[in-house]
Amino acid sequence: MAFHFIASTGRTATTYIAATLNALPGVVACHEGYAGSDKEAEPLLPLINLENARAYQIPSSAETTVAENRSPGIIADALAESGAETLIDIAYYNPMFASALLAAHPQAKMIGIIRDCESFVRSSTTLDGEDPMPVGWADPAKPLTRREEFIALGRIKPRRKTDDKAAWDGWSAIQRNIWLWRETNLRLIEAQSTFPERVLILPFERLKQDPQHFWDAIASHLDLPEISEKAHHGKGKFTNTKAFGYQIEAAAAWSADERQLLHESVEQVEEKLAHVS
């Protein structure tokens, strides 16, 4: 019996990845608690979406959440219920619990997926209309639906008495989502630094550029059966765009302050990543 997990900012094809892995023999892959992302059924794992924000604000609470909702006993029960030999948990909130999960499950391995910052921000920023996949912060002036408000309760934002918190109210959605990208990916890198043999970080762009290499890396790191081209539907079948398209221009059209924060954040993440790789 094995337990592993995949962590990212979101907007990294996690639903598609969960469905592909869930189809492998002996594997059950959960997307945010639901087996194969099937939200018509009861969740296989306890939902911890809202605990995500608390884990960022109070890092020690991540250990409590893992002990209560991702303990070895809970994982064993989920495996027994599914009849699988390997359970893989895939979720945007896993970065906040990554180190706690790895500490609680000494045999577990993690894959972190990092998407290019500019494309993440363009994909996750909404200026108007209901966002069907509200991963990022919407424009501060945009009215939110009840669903968007609920999901926002679990999204991380700056801690009190920090420079980022002081700047937050004056930031655009672009700046807020650059910050979200940076802080989430720094947690992935922190987990890799602490558990270097058990954490693999993959660039999201490889999924399109060289899909077989992407899937081979996942299978090798997590000790999974071979993921053939047929299993992942082949190159060119994957798309990851919002139904209504991007609502902001490319970074060249952003304000000077937005481009400055983009540059600083990318530089910080790349520097940390290079140090642990």
Image (cartoon, rainbow, N blue to C red):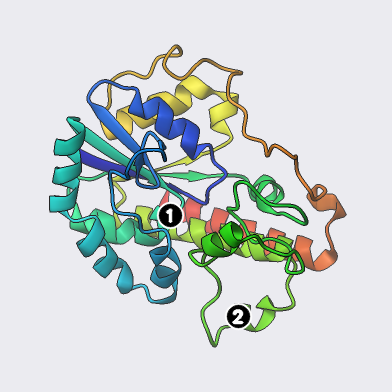
68 in relation to 81, above or below: below
Please provide percent x and percent y for residue 133: 59, 47
| Label 2: how many Cα within 10 Å (few below 14, some 14–19, many 20+) | some
Q: Residue at x 60, y 53 (%)?
A: 134
Closer to us: mark 1 or mark 2? 2
Residue 69 percent location from the top left of the image: 25, 58
Q: State the residue at coordinates (74%, 63%).
A: 139
Which of pointers 1 and 2 lies earlier in the amino acid sequence?
2
Q: Residue furthest bottom?
A: 161
Residue type marked 2: Lys
**Extreme residue in the top direction:** 230
Q: So how many labels did they put on this image?
A: 2
Tag 1: Cα neighbours inside 10 Å, few (<14), some, or many (≥20)?
many
Residue 117 drawn above or below residue 51 = above
Answer with left or right where residue 109 lies relative to residue 248: left
Does dot 2 land on a helix, a strand or a loop? helix
In percent of width and height, residue 157 lies at: 55, 71
Q: Quadrant of residue 218?
A: top left
Residue 147, x across and y down, in percent? 57, 57
Q: Which residue is mark 2?
A: 165
Q: Identify the residue shown where x is 54% and y is 88%.
A: 161
Residue at the disc numbered 1: 188
Residue 1: in sight, yes or no?
Answer: no
Where is 84 relative to 51, above or below? above
Tell me the kind of residue under disc 1.
Answer: Leu
Task: Identify the image quadrant of the N terminus.
Answer: top left
Query: What is the spatial separation of the Cα atoms under label 1 and label 2, in whole angstroms?
Result: 22 Å
